[in-house]
């Protein structure tokens, strides 16, 4: 699915209970704490004896465990070929390291790649742990200072330069019309959940917005679970594995996922976004939010509610 909802998200919450209580995907892999302990013991003896704790999460791609106080182990949730998974994790590590070098705010840095074992069938990764509270747990949407911080982050990525790279055609960040089949599926599956005729009308306009500007470096998934907050300010940004060239409007999804109207205007002014770029940012948020509502309605209510909130902001 080209618009897989929240597919990059890693949402950090409290360290209580299982990382996921409900299966979100038909091909989801269970990752018990005992398995994680065995993998760490076998593959990374330097961390032997460190406390291993599951991170309660509404994330959709990885099960996360803390290793001691400074590390986080990430285990892909959906079954995939081991070689394919390792290649994807290596690409994510490269992207995360690049983001960490240029970001004005803390981002996780790659530490190690683990191999299949102890009953877990795929490679897995270890990165640094960032302190802070996810925006899912402390709402910064009314903070103008947070909006200014978010603009500083987005501007730094845009200014980094792509080094001649271009959008690779995967996921969001290219042409809006490419997502028509995905949106049609979303509309059909949302008939009993949302005002679909109104939403179809909105999409009929948004999808026709032309591209404006060359690719820039983008985070690609500025949703509440990927943003850490402290005292109403941006404290860190998670999930740097999607750092890549894309439509300059892509990171403007954060305006709709994370901010109310007045701070949203602060972000727009700080970035100097024109009407076309701003509306394309709205369009990318719309594509993502439409999928979140129905796909996670039962298995991940927090993610589904985020999609509803974003759609409400767009319709308003």
Image (tube, rainbow, N blue to C red):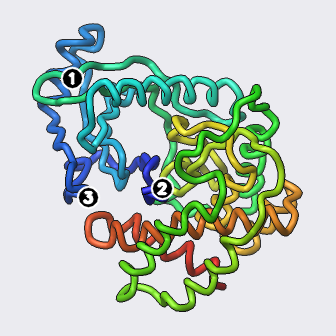
| Label 2–label 3 contact, CB within 8 A | no
User: CA separation, marks 2 and 3?
Assistant: 18 Å
Does dot 1 land on a helix, a strand or a loop? loop
Give SS at disc 3. Answer: loop
- Mark 2, Cα crowd under 10 Å, few <14 / some 14-19 / many 20+, is some
Residue 105 image offset from top left, x and y in percent: 66, 36
Q: Residue at label 1?
A: 116
Is label 2 or label 1 in front? 2
Q: Could you say which disc has been placed on residue 241 in the image?
A: none
Q: Earlier in the sequence, mark 2 or mark 3?
A: 2
Which is nearer the N-term, disc 3 or disc 1? 3
97 left or right of 189 in image: right
Query: As drawn, is 173 to the left or to the right of 118?
Result: right
> Image height check: is 154 above or below 210?
above
When the figure is inspected, residue 308 is found, relative to residue 193, above or below; the finding is above
> In whole angstroms, how far apart are the C-alphas of marks 2 and 1?
28 Å
């Amino acid at each position: 699915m080209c618009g897989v909802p929240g597919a990059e998200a890693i949402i950090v919450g409290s360290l209580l209970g299982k990382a996921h209580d409900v299966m979100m995907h038909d091909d989801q892999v269970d990752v018990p704490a005992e398995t994680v302990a065995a993998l760490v013991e076998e593959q990374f003896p330097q961390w032997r004896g460190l406390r291993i704790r599951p991170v309660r999460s509404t994330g959709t791609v990885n099960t996360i465990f803390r290793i001691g106080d400074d590390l986080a182990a990430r285990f892909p949730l959906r079954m995939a070929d081991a070689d394919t998974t390792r290649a994807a994790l290596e690409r994510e590590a490269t992207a995360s390291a690049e983001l960490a070098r240029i970001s004005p705010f803390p981002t996780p840095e790659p530490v190690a790649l683990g191999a299949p074992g102890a009953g877990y069938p795929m490679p897995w990764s270890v990165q640094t742990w960032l302190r802070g509270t996810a925006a899912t747990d402390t709402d910064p949407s009314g903070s103008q200072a947070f909006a200014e911080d978010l603009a500083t982050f987005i501007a730094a990525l845009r200014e980094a330069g792509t080094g001649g790279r271009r959008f690779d055609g995967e996921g969001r960040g290219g042409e809006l019309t490419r997502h028509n089949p995905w949106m049609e599926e979303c509309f059909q599956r949302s008939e009993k959940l949302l005002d679909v005729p109104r939403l179809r009308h909105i999409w009929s306009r948004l999808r026709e917005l032309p591209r404006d500007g060359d690719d820039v470096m983008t985070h690609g998934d500025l949703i509440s679970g990927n943003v850490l907050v402290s005292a109403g300010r941006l404290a860190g940004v998670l999930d740097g594995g999607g750092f890549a060239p894309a439509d300059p409007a892509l990171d403007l999804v954060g305006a709709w996922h994370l901010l109310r109207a007045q701070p949203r205007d602060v972000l727009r002014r700080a970035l100097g976004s024109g009407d076309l770029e701003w509306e394309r940012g709205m369009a990318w948020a719309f594509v993502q939010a439409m999928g979140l509502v129905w796909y996670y309605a039962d298995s991940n209510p927090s993610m589904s509610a985020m999609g509803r909130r974003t759609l409400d902001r767009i319709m308003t």
